[in-house]
């Protein structure tokens, strides 16, 4: 039995997810190390690192948005499917399509308004790290783009599954 070649979008989704999963480990480990060093400096050396809290907060923002994209790719976001399970098969297909369209709309909003907000704060800098804030807030449109790729792949798979079930 021959295997169908994966679509370009599917391969992109898998590659993005694998890269992000590795990045999540680095970000999470870095955040934990920074907080541990801060605790050591504050309580043992009695000298606080002025930049550590801000960096940990920014890393948490990136960790959250990137983690959401990995959870979406794995389809492991929590959901309430009590009503969905009670629907007849035909309505379930329609509900799945509506959920995908709503998700893709949300991801588009994240991209558009995330870019606008990043542009709006482009001249602001963070107080401790002196980083431009657009770098931190650019995670919203970046994660929106990644979620859009994953969402399109999942949407196409569900459309193919619905067409094959007919």
Image (tube, rainbow, N blue to C red):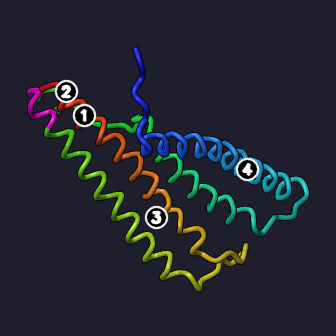
On screen, residue 116 above or below 79: below
Q: Residue 117 in the image: state x and y as whole percent.
A: 45, 76
Residue stretch in magenta: 88-93
Position of 110 with respect to 84 (left or right) is right
Establish if 131 lies above or below 54.
below
Relative image position of residue 78 (x, y in whole percent) = 36, 37
Nearest the viewer among 55 and 160 is 160
Instruction: Kindly identify the residue that appears in the image at 34 percent across and 47 percent down.
Output: 152
Q: Say which quarter of the image contains residue 94.
A: top left
Q: Residue 30 — which label? A: 4
Task: Please provide percent x and percent y for residue 122.
Answer: 56, 81
Q: Secondary structure at mark 2?
A: helix
Q: Image point 16% across, 40% down: which residue? A: 95
Label 3 Cα neighbours within 10 Å, binned few <14 / some 14-19 / many ≥20: many
- Name the mark nearer the viewer: 1 or 4: 1
**Residue position for label 3:** 141
Of mark 2 and mark 4, the one earlier in the sequence is: 4
Q: What whole-number distance in Å separates the C-alpha atoms at marks 3 and 1? A: 28 Å
Q: Which residue is mark 2?
A: 164
Q: Which mark is residue 100?
A: none
């Amino acid at each position: 039995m021959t295997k169908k070649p994966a679509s370009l979008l599917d391969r992109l989704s898998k590659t993005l997810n694998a890269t992000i999963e590795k990045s999540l480990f680095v970000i999470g480990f870095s955040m934990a190390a920074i907080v541990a060093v801060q605790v050591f400096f504050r309580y043992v050396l009695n000298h606080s690192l002025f930049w550590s809290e801000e960096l940990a907060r920014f890393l948490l923002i990136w960790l959250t948005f990137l983690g959401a994209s990995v959870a979406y790719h794995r389809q492991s976001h929590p959901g309430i499917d009590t009503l969905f399970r009670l629907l007849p098969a035909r309505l379930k297909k329609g509900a799945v399509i509506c959920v995908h369209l709503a998700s893709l709309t949300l991801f588009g909003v994240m991209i558009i308004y995330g870019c606008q907000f990043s542009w709006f704060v482009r001249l602001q800098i963070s107080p401790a790290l002196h980083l431009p804030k657009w770098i931190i807030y650019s995670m919203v449109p970046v994660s929106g783009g990644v979620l859009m790729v994953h969402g399109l792949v999942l949407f196409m798979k569900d459309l193919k599954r619905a067409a094959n079930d007919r």
